[in-house]
Image (tube, rainbow, N blue to C red):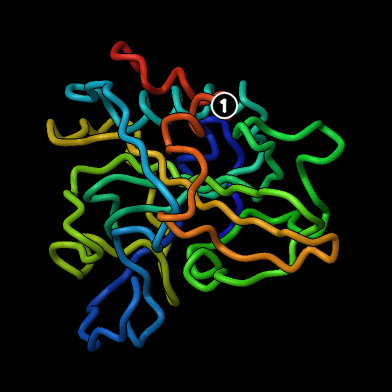
């Protein structure tokens, strides 16, 4: 799947289609066919916006999210569908960034590392539990999800073409700009935090019980606080 930029024009580019998924579940967030499904990979913390999206279109919400992300300095993102034809919404992933202890992005010179120049894939988020980071400190990836699928524990309901997000042989489908969102749709930010305690950069995923900041504080510090406004979008 290609990396997508922020303007709405990039959102209308297709990201694939899954047909006839009949394989057995292989654990985690995917199947033994390497398809990945909703819910997202295990995360450090999550925050749900209080905004009501009822009556809004996919395009309106995507445009507003793109505007907020751009204003906060997230110039590179990656778009995923939730459902083979966006039946249950979409998700956006940001590039790995270095952050301060208060959750704010590091200085411009330190925020983005050329070692992690690409926006991570869902498969990367699944597997990145130990990793070599650019140096000592804290790091973060954000996944923003607009969906009407309720999250029950770690498993979706159901695990099929309506909740597939990525995988092999995904055909292109258009982003449904004019489609109205379901009344049950919510906007949630999932925080994936990583930390390295030594200069050599040997790091690890920060488990939920080891998180120093709640997701709400991470969202505010990242500059994405406007997505919590009740008038959003």
x, y percent for residue 229: 35, 15
x, y percent for residue 85: 28, 54
The residue located at (41%, 62%) in the rendering is 16
Instruction: Tell how many labels.
Output: 1
Q: Is residue 83 above or below residue 167?
A: above
The answer to whether 195 appears left or right of 115 in the picture is left
x, y percent for residue 192: 51, 52
Q: Is residue 34 above or below residue 219?
A: below
Q: Quadrant of residue 147?
A: top left
Q: Residues within 10 Å of mark 1 (few under 14, many from 20)?
A: some
The residue located at (51%, 26%) in the rendering is 224
Q: Nearer the viewer, residue 89 or 101?
A: 101
The residue located at (43%, 38%) in the rendering is 215
Q: Nearer the viewer, residue 63 or 51?
A: 51
The answer to whether 58 appears left or right of 170 in the picture is left
x, y percent for residue 190: 42, 46
As helix, strand or loop, the secondary structure at mark 1 comes to helix
Q: Nearer the viewer, residue 7 or 133?
A: 133
Residue hosting label 1: 221
Q: Quadrant of the N terminus?
A: bottom right
């Amino acid at each position: 799947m290609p990396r997508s930029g922020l303007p709405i024009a990039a959102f209308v580019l297709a990201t694939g289609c899954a047909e006839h998924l009949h394989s057995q579940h292989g654990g985690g967030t995917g199947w033994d066919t390497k398809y990945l499904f909703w819910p997202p990979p295990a995360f450090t913390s999550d925050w749900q916006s209080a905004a009501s999206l009822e009556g809004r279109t996919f395009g309106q919400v995507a445009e507003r999210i793109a505007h907020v992300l751009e204003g906060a300095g997230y110039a590179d993102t990656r778009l995923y569908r939730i459902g083979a034809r966006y039946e249950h919404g979409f998700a956006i992933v940001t590039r790995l960034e270095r952050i301060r202890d208060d959750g704010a992005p590091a200085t411009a010179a330190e925020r983005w590392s050329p070692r992690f120049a690409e926006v991570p894939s869902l498969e990367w988020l699944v597997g990145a539990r130990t990793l070599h980071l650019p140096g000592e400190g804290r790091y973060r990836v954000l996944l923003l999800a607009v969906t009407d699928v309720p999250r029950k524990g770690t498993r979706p309901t159901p695990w099929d073409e309506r909740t597939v997000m990525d995988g092999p042989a995904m055909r292109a489908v258009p982003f449904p700009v004019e489609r109205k969102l379901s009344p049950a749709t919510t906007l949630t930010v999932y925080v994936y935090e990583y930390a390295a305690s030594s200069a050599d950069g040997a790091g690890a995923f920060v488990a939920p019980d080891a998180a120093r900041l709640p997701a709400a504080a991470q969202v505010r510090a990242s500059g994405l606080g406007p997505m919590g406004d009740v008038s959003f979008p």
